[in-house]
Image (cartoon, rainbow, N blue to C red):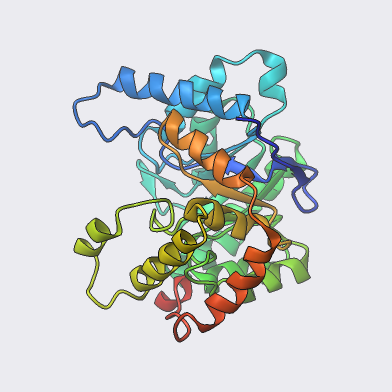
Amino acid sequence: MAAQLRQKALGGTGVTVTELGVGGYIGALTDASATDTARQDAAIVAVQRAIHLGVRYFDTSPAYGTAERYLGAALATLPADVRARLTVSTKVGTHPERPNAYGAADVRWCLAQSAHMLGRIDMVYVHDPVTDAHMDAILAPGGAFEALEQLKAAGEIRGFGLGVRRHHFLLRAIDSGRVDVILPSYDYHPIRQSLGPVLDAAIAAGVAVVNGSPYQAGLLAGADLHEAAKRRPPDDADLARAQAIVAWCAQRHIDVGALAVQFSLRDRRIGATLVGPRTVDEVESGVRHATEPIPASVWDELGNFLAHLQPAAAPGGEASQ
């Protein structure tokens, strides 16, 4: 596989990332009998393979079970010159020992735990506030943003922002004028583009965007949609659109996973796109999806198809304000 991933400057942070990054639950094997050692070994091999294929950006979180520890173990296997070329981000505020803790002391404590495992951390996202009171705490004096501003000024990190699905919270962060980057998820892919106004606001404010979950929880990654239907409401709009998109791609002999990933990569408002592989095979499919040629005519057809696919999708991340 000859990966040709572009490298891009992420907004005004001075941080360079590959357009495709690896995040999520690395090493989370589906085999329930797998030992912790086997899972960590699988994660190490997956990270090494991703680097070999050209990936230079890795994201994690202490909220993702063992993923942060496994990523740290993988990074520790790398030669110093290889590690120096990577961009690594993690998250604060949702550590299992301090959930939804957004004060400055909590942020510094959480980041220290992560740095012990990961080494140098380039970017930090305040993670998954649930209420406006959480956002108030993040923005307040003595809150998460203040702590991260101080760490950035001291050169301990290079950029920070907010990682959450709720659009209202992302807009509050953008409007504050304090963040370098946002990490939304689940709301910008062929199934639904409800994130569009947030993308526009971010670009207007000079805030970089890292888009998460381009496959929409696997619906566009080659998942068995008949099985997915058993776990979803019978009137699930996302599933219905996924079924139509998969059929449309099949008629044109296009890999729906490639369509999903490149839909995000092609948008100039998006600096990087995160996929969430668990294994080497999933790393390879993610890179293939990012680099597999798709005829230009397909994108023209797709725009018309999505515009008339069905009535506009119900709002996604913004629905639970």
> Is residue 143 shown to the viewer in this render?
no
Q: How many marks?
A: 0
Query: In this view, which residue lies farthest toward the bottom?
Result: 311
Q: Residue at x 46, y 69 (%)?
A: 133
**302 in relation to 127, above or below:** below
Quadrant where the C terminus sits is: bottom left
Whether residue 197 is visible, yes or no, is yes
Relative to 44, 85 lies left or right: right
Residue 264, percent from left and from top: 61, 58
Say which quarter of the image contains residue 303. Answer: bottom right
Q: Residue at x 67, y 30 (%)?
A: 86
Q: Quadrant of the N terminus?
A: top right
Residue 306 position, x and y percent, is 53, 76
Residue 228 image offset from top left, x and y in percent: 26, 59
Q: Is residue 140 left or right of residue 203?
A: left
**214 and 176: which is toward the camera:** 214
Q: Residue at x 64, y 28 (%)?
A: 120
The answer to which of 25 and 305 lies nearer the viewer is: 305
Q: Residue at left 70%, top 67%?
A: 202
Give above or below for 233 relative to 57: below
Kindly indicate the quadrant of the structure image that contains residue 230. Answer: bottom left
Residue 85 placement (x, y as % from top left): 72, 27
